[in-house]
Image (cartoon, rainbow, N blue to C red):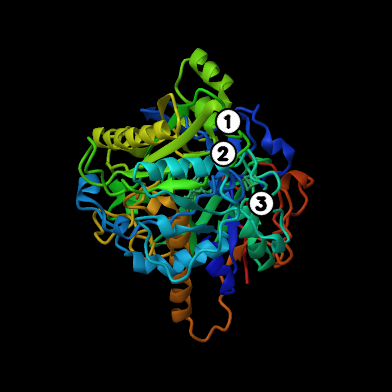
Amino acid sequence: MAALPLVRAGLRVLMLERGDWIRRGEHNRSWSLRWNEREAYDPDSAFLAEGESRGPVGMLHCVGGASVFFGGVGLRFRERDFEGDPNVSGDVRWCLGYGDLAAYYDEAERLLGVTGDGHDDVTSPPRTRPLPPPALPLSPTSAALADAARRIGLNPFRLPMALNGDDTSGRARCTACDTCDGFPCAIGAKNDVSTVVLPALLAGGLALRPNMVVSRLVARGARVVEAQCVERDTGAARRFRGKQFVLAAGALATPHILLSSGLAARNPAGDMVGRHLMRHCNGVVVGAAPAPWGDPADFRKQIGLHDFYFGDSEAEGPAGKLGGIQQLRATRIALAMAPLPAGVRQALGSMLGRLVGLIVMAEDQPRPENRVVLDPRRSDGYGGPAALVQHRHSPRDRQARRALARRAVQILREMGAAFSIVLPVRTFSHAMGTVRMGEDPRRFPVAPDGRFRGLENLWIADASAFPTAGAVNPSLTISANALRVATGIVAGWSAARPSHPRLELERVGGTGQRAGASARWTRPSARRPGAPDTLGASSARQRPGASDAPAERPDR
Ligand SMILES: Cc1cc2nc3c(=O)[nH]c(=O)nc-3n(C[C@H](O)[C@H](O)[C@H](O)COP(=O)(O)OP(=O)(O)OC[C@H]3O[C@@H](n4cnc5c(N)ncnc54)[C@H](O)[C@@H]3O)c2cc1C
Ligand code: SF4
């Protein structure tokens, strides 16, 4: 998303992406594939978790990032999310207010085609224009859930969703299928970044290098001068120079790259790099009814509840903010990933038609001991050390999840559930906050404008910059902030060069051709070894991590 203002301004932009384009088709709809067998799941994960979650942390690497797999919910932070809650985050708050992001939220929603109706959301922030009407009609199961919630005095609302319902868009229209959250859309109807943002960027001149792993950023003086990379399919080492570097590899990979590159030492808050990892304290509440519950094919990610977002005075639970409750489509995913004995999982799996799920999303505390650190015992497979993800939810995090789960059980009971079970979510799908943005240079590695402190030309534009997590799905805020940061880069660049009619970002290594004018990237796997790629660099095979690639000369 950060590339958009840069490309629009006429800067020459190169995007280095570890993953490949996702192939679309019916194979994307296969429930038989386990999570770690899906395309884009990187089994050679550089990340190992210890703490509450143990073992390899699955990473989804593909063009468009995790948005390709996301459930499509496009919620803005609430106004008070930016102010922080002392019960959750002590004195930490965002250095931005909602007003600083409001226009970028408008833009992000427009780009991602978010539709919905926020009228009944009791916590909605103000907006200048209503969202377009929802892409899908309310399904009978969703209507039954909303009715049950209303009967017990709650205010259910339609979740804003990034699914295509526009017949005139020239793209496939969403068919409300069974495999959305956790899957790439088989027909391209989900408005993810690779589907709705990147094609226009490529047409506008963005150069994209998929299957290119950034292993290290090299700094000289106060500036990053090059990104050292390894081509995934050939093992060839690559180096790319630039004038400005925007790092947006996600809240686990961004601190890993910074730490591997030794850049934390240059930052006055260097010891904070990697710390304060958050992931929300999520849980899935599955209710089982005596008989099948509506049509199992009903679309079931449409309703949200924010009645307890800022607390619940009537229920036992921690003081202060709690979070949200949302309808969940992917009961099957939740069951597959749940830490349940195989027999229980099988029994529940056999009664899928009788299950309805809600997800509770509690804001978690930013704690310094939750962090990404280098693991010198293991290699990341690309010449650097692997990363260790150390994370445990605090007692308050778990109390907040329990309080929301009790309310979710109440709603499901009102809907007709005979019994419910609560399953903790142990993934890092909402990872945030490892390179926090804030005013105080000793506490926050990222300045309010998005610049990594201690270096003039390195910017952070992903979930790493979040100082607190809010309690809504993070994508829209990540997108809005990325647009803000990149708009600031353009403004700074223009101010320094008032006479430049077109802004130029230097790209290294090539024939002088500009890739992308008509989406002219090629899949490296389709290239002959040694043949020039779209940027004209030779793809000679080299050991991973070898840094003897010929220095690629600036293309002026
Ligand atoms: C199953 C699932 C469902 C979700 N549902 C929702 C939802 O409904 N709503 C919502 O708001 N959020 C949702 N999320 C969360 C959301 O997708 C993420 O919070 C968001 O995509 C994170 O954005 P990011 O830019 O920080 O990182 P990412 O989206 O992870 O992007 C980082 C990119 O950097 C690349 N990369 C990483 N390391 C390197 C490297 N060394 N070199 C080169 N490239 C690299 C990655 O391949 C990736 O493309 C969901 C997530 C998952 C997994
Ligand atoms: S068809 Fe609709 S519901 Fe199915 S994956 Fe695509 S966007 Fe999601």
Residue located beneath label 3 in the image: 189
Q: Residue at x 58, y 79 (%)?
A: 502
Q: Residue at x 39, y 38 (%)?
A: 360
- The spot of residue 309 in percent (x, y) is 32, 48
Query: The disc labelled 2 sits on which kind of residue?
Result: Gly
Please identify the quarter of the rendering in which residue 177 is found: top right
Query: The disc labelled 1 sits on which kind of residue?
Result: Trp
- The spot of residue 283 in percent (x, y) is 40, 34
Q: Secondary structure at mark 3?
A: loop
Residue located beneath label 1 in the image: 35
Asked whether residue 425 is in view, the answer is no
531 left or right, relative to 486: right
Query: The disc labelled 3 sits on which kind of residue?
Result: Ala
Asked whether residue 295 is in view, the answer is yes
Q: Residue at x 48, y 52 (%)?
A: 158
409 left or right, relative to 348: left
- Judge: label 3 CB < 8 Å from ligand 2: yes
Q: Are marks 3 and 2 in contact (CB under 8 Å)?
A: no
First-in-chain label (3 vs 2):
2
Q: Nearer the viewer, mark 2 or mark 1?
A: 2
Q: Crowding near pointer 1: few (<14 within 10 Å), some, many (20+)?
A: some
- Judge: label 2 CB < 8 Å from ligand 1: yes
Please identify the quarter of the rendering in which residue 165 is found: bottom right
First-in-chain label (1 vs 3):
1
